Image (spheres, rainbow, N blue to C red):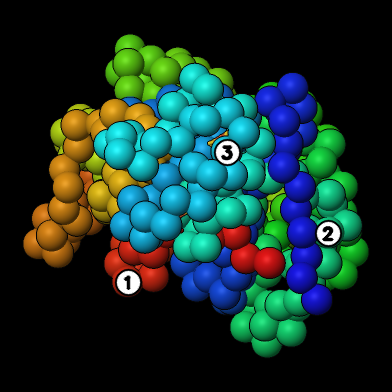
Amino acid sequence: MPIAASRTTPGESRRPLIVDIRRGSLEDGPGIRSVVFFKGCPLRCVFCHNPETQEICPEIAFTEERCMHCGSCAKACPQAALDLSSPTRIDRDRCDLCGACEDACPTSALRIVGKYWPVDTLVELLLRDESFYRHSGGGVTLSGGECTLFPEYVATLLQRLKALGIHIAIETSGWFDYEVFAEKILPSVDLIFFDLKLMDADESRRYLGQSNERILENLRRLLAEPRRASRLEVRPRVPLIPGITDTRINLSRIVNCLCHLGPSTMSVVPYNPLGLAAYRRLGKSTPDLPTSFTNPDREAELIDTVRRLIAEADRPLAQLDRELTSKSVNREARTSVPALVA
Ligand code: SF4
Ligand code: SF4
């Protein structure tokens, strides 16, 4: 039976919106997982690989390669905001995000990004894969964007899933209100992927749009949390962005910080260019970033650098070296346009 999410008007933008729900993922935690991508992020990383999740309000996206120029969308648009002869296609000043063009488009070339899912509806969808979670040691991962922006909604969602014994992971930028997070979200979480990008405060402001003070403090507090029955795992994750986060000085400072804080694992994530097309789909200018994947030699060199930095740290943490993982994306799996699964 199909499950429907609802559109949100701009006036309702504080309701949590979901950009995509990816079922059957093997990349966002252990086992087979469903990944829920929330819309809205407090950071503005210049290298954001998922720009559809930055703004908290709905947006309209146009995927040119999917368009067969049938004209149905322009006929359906009450605002006359669509012009098939225009290279940008959408007059975003006129568009009120009503979604009539999305309904009319036979190929999903036009799509309203960000739909509201009542918790019951979302739980119902996520539970369709419950047997996969159980047999594979998988579960549900909340990603984004920043799911911690919606503590009440997330708390209700996670309590429902946790009551059924489902493993929960979250992916976070680390920029959240710790007290609220600890009260509402942390009790239901088994695994936290915590992004650690830049150690220099000025560079953080320049490349992430926020100082890193709160991020570092939150990581410190999380790693100092009693490990409730050894269940919670906090895994710092470092995206390797060429010339920005993958510099030796930044990696050295990250490794030294982690060796002092003592997580048992860490991951590095080699750069991939898959997010660049999303900027175009949203009508935004594309950031000045490499258009190709990190080649395997460079990836191996960076991992080797991190291993050497761990060995040379003030307090080398041998376990961190043993558990260091590199999370390259599956290129084939991530080249398709995200589609909301229902
Ligand atoms: S969302 Fe509505 S107003 Fe905007 S382009 Fe589509 S039909 Fe027109
Ligand atoms: S309805 Fe879809 S396929 Fe047809 S012209 Fe509009 S965007 Fe292209």
Q: Which mark is residue 77?
A: 3
Residue visible at 84% across and 49% down in the picture: 118
Mark 3–mark 1 Cα distance, whole angstroms, equals: 34 Å
Give the left or right position of residue 287, taking residue 248 as reference: right
- The residue at the point 74 percent across, 67 percent down is 126
Residue furthest to the left: 297
Between marks 2 and 3, how big is the CA–CA gap? 29 Å
Could you say which disc has been placed on residue 332 in the image? 1
Q: Are marks 3 and 1 in contact (CB under 8 Å)?
A: no
Q: Quadrant of the N terminus?
A: bottom right
Q: Amino acid at mark 1?
A: Glu
Mark toward the start of the polypeptide (3 vs 1)? 3
Compared with 253, 277 (above or below) is below
In the current view of this chain or complex, which residue is farthest to the front?
A: 75
Q: Which residue is mark 2?
A: 121
Q: Is residue 166 left or right of residue 326?
A: right
Q: Amino acid at mark 3?
A: Cys
Instruction: Please state which of the two labelled residues, at mark 3 or mark 1, is closer to the viewer.
Output: 3
Identify the mark at residue 127; answer none if there is no mark. Answer: none
Q: Percent position (x, y) of residue 299? A: 18, 57
Q: Nearer the viewer, residue 79 or 190?
A: 79
User: Could you tell me residue 68's position as x and y percent?
Assistant: 36, 60
Q: Secondary structure at mark 3?
A: loop
What amino acid type is highlighted by mark number 2?
Thr
Q: Nearer the viewer, residue 282 or 91?
A: 91
